[in-house]
Amino acid sequence: MNLTLVSSGDDQALAIRDHLLPLVREGGTLELQRDAIRLLSLRTGAWTVEHWTPFNDLSPEEASSPGYRHAVERQHTRPGLPYGLEVWRAGTKLLCILWADGGKFEVLDFVRGSWEADALAL
C-alpha cells in the first residue's frame, strides 16, 4: 500500500504571510490603535490585507500600573498568539493566520485557490 501525504497548506499560508507582511507594514494605514492592539490595513484594488500587533502605548486615561497589566493578562484563558494577518479579496476572507515571536502559529482560515499566486505577485 502506498501512502500519499496531503499538505495542510500551512507552508503556503506562511509563504503568503511572509510576502504580504512587509507590504502592509510599509504601505499600510494605521486603522486602530486602542486597548491591546494596533491594526494596519493595506487596500490595493480588490485586496485588503490587515495586520495587527500587540504593541500599543497606553492612553492617558488608562492605568499604566503593573496591577492593571496583570489584570488584563488574567482575562485570557490560554496564551494568545499576539500577531495576526487577514487577507481579503473582493469582500471574501481568504486567509487568517495568527503567530507569536517564538515561531508558534495557527492558520484559522485558508481558502485554497488561484488567488494564492496573485497574492504572491503583489
Image: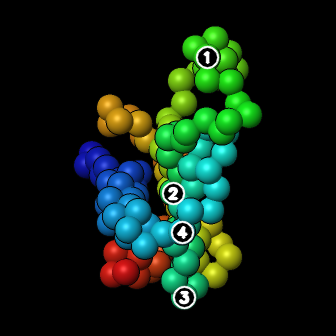
- State the image coordinates of residue 10 (x, y, percent, origin top left): 38, 51
The residue to which callout 3 is attached is 45
* Label located before the other in sequence (4 or 1): 4
- Whole-angstrom CA distance, mark 2 to mark 1, is 28 Å
Camera-nearest label, 2 or 4: 4
Q: Residue at x 50, y 46 (%)?
A: 53
Q: Earlier in the sequence, mark 2 or mark 3?
A: 3
Q: Residue furthest left?
A: 2
Any mark on residue 65, and which?
Answer: 1
CA gap between label 3 and label 1 equals 43 Å
Q: Nearer the viewer, residue 11 or 40?
A: 40
Task: Indicate the secondary structure of the residue bearing disc 4.
Answer: strand
Q: Is residue 70 left or right of residue 104?
A: right
Residue at the extreme bottom of the image, as rendered: 45
Name the outermost residue toward the right: 61
Reply above or below: 66 against 24: above
Residue under circle 2?
Answer: 51
- Name the residue carrying label 4: 29
Type of amino acid at the residue the image marks with label 2: His
Lower position in the chain sequence, tag 2 or tag 4: 4
